[in-house]
Amino acid sequence: MRHAVQVLSLLALFAAAASCASTVPLDPSQPESPVTTVQVWNQNPVDMTLYVTNGIHRIRLGLVPGPGTRTFVLPPHLLLSTNWLGFQADPIGADGLSVSEKIQVHPGDRVGLTLGR
C-alpha cells in the first residue's frame, strides 16, 4: 500500500510539472525554430518502429505501417549539438534492425526515407 501511495505521489508530481510546461517561447521577440520533418515510405509487409539518433540520444518517432507512409516532426533539440542524424527502423514481430547512414539535417529540412525490402 505504501508503495502505491509513493507511485501516485510521483505521478501527481510529474503531472503538476507537465502542466507548468509551456510551448510559448521564453522571448517572444525570438522566432520559433523551423519545423524539421522526415517522411518515411515503408515498402515492407510489416510495421516498423522508427527511431532517430544524433549519436547521443535515441528517440522513438513512432510507427510506420507496412506498406505505408508516415511523416514525423523531428524534435528541435536533436539539432542543437549536431546536424548529423541517423535513423533506425525496427520491424514489429520480426528480427533485423535497419540502420541508415548518418545524414546532415538542418532546421527546416524535409527528409525522405525509404524502408526497402
Image (cartoon, rainbow, N blue to C red):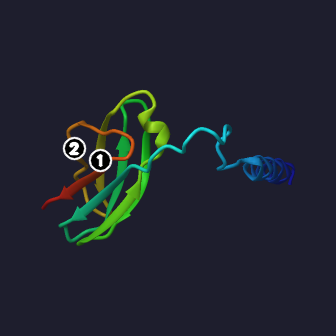
The amino acid marked with disc number 2 is Ser
Q: Is residue 112 above or below residue 31?
A: below
Residue placed most toward the observer, 60 or 21: 21
- At label 2, counting other C-alpha atoms closer than 10 Å, the crowd grade (few under 14, some 14-19, many 20 or more) is some
The quarter of the picture where residue 66 lies is: bottom left
Residue placed most toward the observer, 100 or 36: 36
Q: Quadrant of the C terminus?
A: bottom left
Q: Is residue 27 above or below residue 87?
A: above
Q: Residue furthest left?
A: 117
Residue 100's tag is 2
Q: Residue furthest top?
A: 81
Where is residue 7? Give x, y as percent: 78, 50
Q: Is residue 88 above or below residue 80?
A: below
Residue ID at (28%, 68%): 69
Q: Secondary structure at mark 2?
A: loop
Q: Is residue 34 above or below residue 44?
A: above
* Disc nearer the start of the sequence (2/1): 1
Where is residue 95? Give x, y as percent: 24, 55
Residue 76's tag is none
Residue ID at (34%, 39%): 106
The amino acid marked with disc number 1 is Gln
Q: Secondary structure at mark 1?
A: strand
Query: In this figure, which residue is indicated by the disc labeled 1?
Result: 88
